[in-house]
Amino acid sequence: MRKLRLCRIDRNGCVSCGCRRFRQTNVINEALASSWELSARERAAFDEREGKACINCGMSKRVRMLLWSLKRLFPEGRDLRVVHFNQINQLGPALQALGDVIETCYHAELERGVPVGASVNEDMCRLTFPDNHFDLAVHSETLEHLFDFNQALSEIRRVLKPGGMQVYSVPLLHGRQTRQRIRKQANNGIVYLHSPSHHGNEGEFPVVWEFGRDFIDRRASQIQQIHYDNYWTNRTVFTVVEVKV
């Protein structure tokens, strides 16, 4: 059964550094708001999620939400095997306190599994790691850029030990259904079903999926918990916890 846990992650200050002061910056630009067809309220919610940062350490609310969940699921000092996909900003030091961490990146032109600096090149849909290897997998804002996000979630589940957890977030709007923006053709070409949309700088990270409430419904059998910062006013700030039974 899925368990909702409601919290206020900033009640006692920044979960990372303890600072009690935050700065709000509007980060959802006009192009993204228009392509996603966001209402003014939805846009403000995502601006809070991505743009409300601690003035001391700079950690965004989305990342503070992930860290809040990790601190409650895994006390520091554990000897865990952790895989951290695509380096969520500023989360690395907290993960290092949990045990042995493998950081991944993805470069399509490189062989899977090869070192790239301090990271390992990994395709989330075709991981090179063995079965039943990790205690914890962490990722954020990656699934919406993958053509087969269900395959990625299955691959992560494969490499987790029984009882292992994947803790993640996705940009999601509860008031709508999931919509696909890009479709891949048999010849590996792509078809835009809607106008191009990107996260990050223009041209980076094309958005394949815009997730709606059905994402959670479809993952219900795998989800153990969902942690919300403030379910009643901003449902974009949450962490999903899946457990491999």
Image: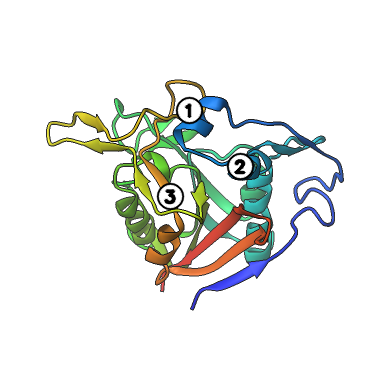
Q: CA distance from mark 3 to mark 2?
A: 13 Å
Q: Secondary structure at mark 1?
A: loop
Is 125 on the left or on the right of 33, as rendered? left
Front position in the image: 37 or 154:
37
Q: Which residue is mark 3?
A: 211
Q: Amino acid at mark 2?
A: Phe
Is 201 on the left or on the right of 222, as rendered? right
Image height of 152 relative to 142, above or below: below
Q: Which residue is mark 1?
A: 117
Instruction: Give the residue displayed 55% in from the left and 69% down from the top.
Output: 225
Q: Amino acid at mark 1?
A: Gly
Give the position of the C terminus as an image quadrant. Answer: bottom left
Q: Which mark is residue 46?
A: 2
Q: Amino acid at mark 3?
A: Phe
Query: Residue 220 location in percent, x, y?
Result: 42, 69
Count the numbered circles shown. Answer: 3
Query: Residue 171 location in percent, x, y?
Result: 51, 46
Is 63 on the left or on the right of 149, as rendered? right
Q: CA distance from mark 2 to mark 1?
A: 32 Å
Q: Closer to the observer: label 3 or label 1?
A: 3
Q: Earlier in the sequence, mark 3 or mark 2?
A: 2
Q: Secondary structure at mark 3?
A: strand
Instruction: Give the residue displayed 56% in from the left and 74% down from the top.
Output: 3
Front position in the image: 69 or 217:
217
Instruction: Give the residue displayed 56% in from the left and 41% down from the top.
Output: 39
Q: Earlier in the sequence, mark 2 or mark 1?
A: 2
